[in-house]
Image (tube, grey):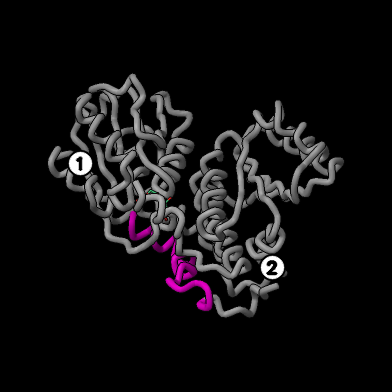
Amino acid sequence: MTNLDTIDFAKYDKSGMIAQIKSFTQDFRKAWELTKSISLPSEYKKIQNVVLLGMGGSGAANEAIRELAYSNACPIECVHDYDLPGYVNENTLVIASSYSGNTEETIRGFSEAKKRNAKLIAITTGGEIKRLAEEYDVPRFIFDYPSEPRMATPYLLSPLLRIFAQLDLYELPENFDKVCDEAEPIIRQFYPEELINKNIAKQLALNLYKKFPIIYSSPYTKGLAMRFKNQINENAKKTAAYDYFPELNHNTIEGYVNADCDLVIVGFQSKFGLDRIQLREKITAEILNRNNVQFERISFNEPTNPLVEHLVLMSFSDAVSFYLSILNQTDPTSIPNIKYLKSQL
Ligand code: F6R
């Protein structure tokens, strides 16, 4: 098997994704600075609900802010689809996020939201979403960051944090630089320079190689588990799935009795979750062990708030999926099936 400590990543990583993985918090700092330009009309504060439109990598950033702002009284829904929920009207804030600006589901939702007189915001690098935002003359965050959408999370999530903070839908923990300062030393432990015996991202990638990972999340990290699964699919070109507590305790755990393939369950836990969820996870791990299914718990004790934890878990997923792509001897950037499908629509 490929040695992750000695291999020259450039052999497979043709576009240099590893540099993006290493600049994750730096990119967040830069993106955060740029979002200072976002200024929203005062009537945007009167909205009654929020709908976030976005697919794939763009949709994953939407899920993150929805989870971070979960305790807010304002209902927030993420739509990964063509159609808007029936309740969308002039009291709804609809934010369309699309890295390319050319994703047809997002374009359709955005145009439909305009017809319903919703308050609109666009986050994109260009394409049709930029054109529509200009035509509708609505607030927009247009950024320039050459990347695959799934690796542009700093530029997709930062404007959402800024918008939500401006609308009092989310309280930022102190200042953003402190968040990055706190996340950085934890994230550095996943870098390639850190050897396997000390690098839990490399260790997990080696563990998942040729196996079927299922990521289990706590209730407020579902979006992170979904993003982790997506990164494994797209970067490593590998099957993966996700599931979440407590629901999985009411169905999934019976499936281990006749597990069909070599599974590894990855417990992707928030330290800010309920004690009852931790207990459920402990008992689930016992059941898995009895059924000879491997369980790996991933949790970080250091983060002092959920935003730091989100950055750490995102960066961890990026690193693990990157190392898996190298083990699979595949270019992490290329996504031929997604490109083919889009070209055939
Ligand atoms: C590709 C990727 C995809 C895209 C998705 C939507 O790197 O992550 O999941 O994010 O196909 O495209 P955008 O983000 O351009 O709207």
Q: Indicate whether residue 85 is drawn in magenta.
A: no
Amino acid type for the residue under numbered disc 2 = Lys
What number of labels is visible?
2
In this picture, residue 198 sits left or right of residue 105: right
Tell me what residue is drawn at x 34 percent, y 60 percent: 30
Start and end of the magenta stretch? 10-31
> In terms of secondary structure, what is the magenta stretch mainly?
helix
- Which residue of the protein is positioned furthest toward the top in this rendering? 87
Residue 27 covered by magenta stretch = yes
Q: Residue at x 30, y 37 (%)?
A: 95
Q: Which numbered disc covers residue 106?
A: none
Residue at the image position 55 percent from the left and 38 percent from the top:
222
Q: Relative to 127, is 118 above or below?
A: above
Residue 149, image x, y percentages: 39, 55
Location of the N terminus (image quadrant): bottom right
Q: From the viewer's side, name the closer residue of 147 and 67.
A: 147
Q: What is the x, y in percent for residue 122?
A: 26, 42
Question: First in sequence: mark 2 or mark 1?
Answer: 1
Q: Which mark is residue 139?
A: 1
Residue type at the position of mark 1: Pro
Residue 45: percent from the left, percent from the top? 26, 28
User: Where, by quadrant of the figure, is residue 53 drawn?
Assistant: top left
Label 2 sits on residue? 198
Neighbour class for label 1 at 10 Å: few (<14), some, many (≥20)? some
